[in-house]
Image (cartoon, grey):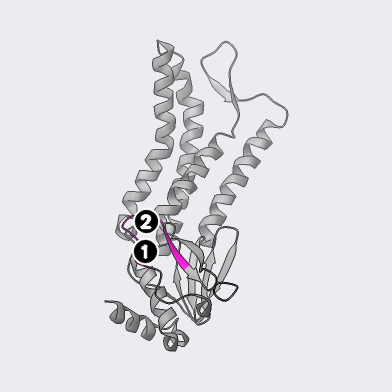
Amino acid sequence: MSLRAARLSIWPFVVAAFALRVCVELWFKPVTWRIDPSGVAFLVWTVVQAACFLVPWVGHALLTRGVRQRPATWEVAAGTGSFVASTSPRWISPPAILFGWLAGGFVLTERVPGEDRVRLADLPGNVALSIAVPAVVLAGAAAVLLLNRPRLTLDRNGITKQSVTRRTFLRWDRLLPGGPPAPPRGAATITLQRQPATPGGPPVPSPLPTGPLHVDPAFLAETIRHYVEHPEHRAAIGTQQELDRLLAALA
């Protein structure tokens, strides 16, 4: 399975989390009304609600287990002259599926008077709201999956950090040589050191989150350090030949 397919395959599990929560609300909730004592009923209800999120999450993790390991390489973005580290499926999967689960909570229901059944709440405009609000939430989750954010891009000029809402650019010639050091195992951030704004001032730290990225953090740090210290290779960034040379140099 490709990395893009792994990210896009999250979408059916988002919809599954939504559908499971709605089904539990409509058809399983009346079952808990017949469970005594009430504390046990609440516990059962909580477990089933959690399962509506956990089952799709675990299902997607099993489906994409072959691509969840972060690799020590880059994607070559054809025609853009850049190396890209896309969003990791294991990072984006839980919040996206959680969005689906939350969307199911916006379908407002109520108990049918005198019966052990659940129906859509008899409120003005509830049907429209129970469709529109979940649709907006699910559309937001779909947009995040399609936009491939956060991601990191390297080109001949520098490093572009693209978060969900913000883009930051760091020029190669503004980064100090010798860093960043290899991060400790399990670290979610590496710290770049930028040249001070005033001569003689202390270096300016620039944190670079690595947790959301589908690239090995140690390899990422080595790549940045390599291009900071070897400007002659920057012009070739974005080609397969340069990626092969980089992998050989950092092996």
Q: Which residue appears farthest toward the left when viewing the image? A: 251
Task: Residue 11 in the image: state x and y as whole percent.
Answer: 47, 51
Callout 1 amino acid: Pro
Residue 139 seen in this snapshot: yes
* 103 to the left or right of 250: right
Earlier in the chain: of badge 1 and badge 2, it is 2
Which picture quadrant has residue 108?
A: top right
Residue 216 seen in this snapshot: no
Q: Which residue appears farthest toward the bottom when viewing the image? A: 232
Residue 185 on the magenta span: yes
Task: Residue 24 in the image: state x and y as whole percent.
Answer: 46, 29
Residue positioned 39% across, 72% down in the render = 74
Task: Residue 19 in the image: state x and y as whole percent.
Answer: 49, 38
* 161 to the left or right of 124: left
Residue holding disc 1: 217
The mark found on residue 208 in the picture is none
Q: Nearer the viewer, residue 83 or 20?
A: 83
Quadrant the N terminus occupies: bottom left
Vertical comparison of 71 with 22: above or below: below
Vertical comparison of 207 with 169: above or below: above
Q: Are marks 1 and 2 in contact (CB under 8 Å)?
A: yes
Neighbours of disc 2 within 10 Å: few (<14), some (14-19), many (20+): few
* 201 to the left or right of 230: right
Neighbours of disc 1 within 10 Å: few (<14), some (14-19), many (20+): many
- Specify start and end residues of the magenta stretch as a single range: 181-192
Task: Residue 26 in the image: state x and y as whole percent.
Answer: 51, 27
Residue holding disc 2: 187
What secondary structure is marked by label 1? helix
Residue positioned 33% across, 82% down in the render = 244
Q: CA distance from mark 1 to mark 2?
A: 8 Å
Callout 2 amino acid: Ala
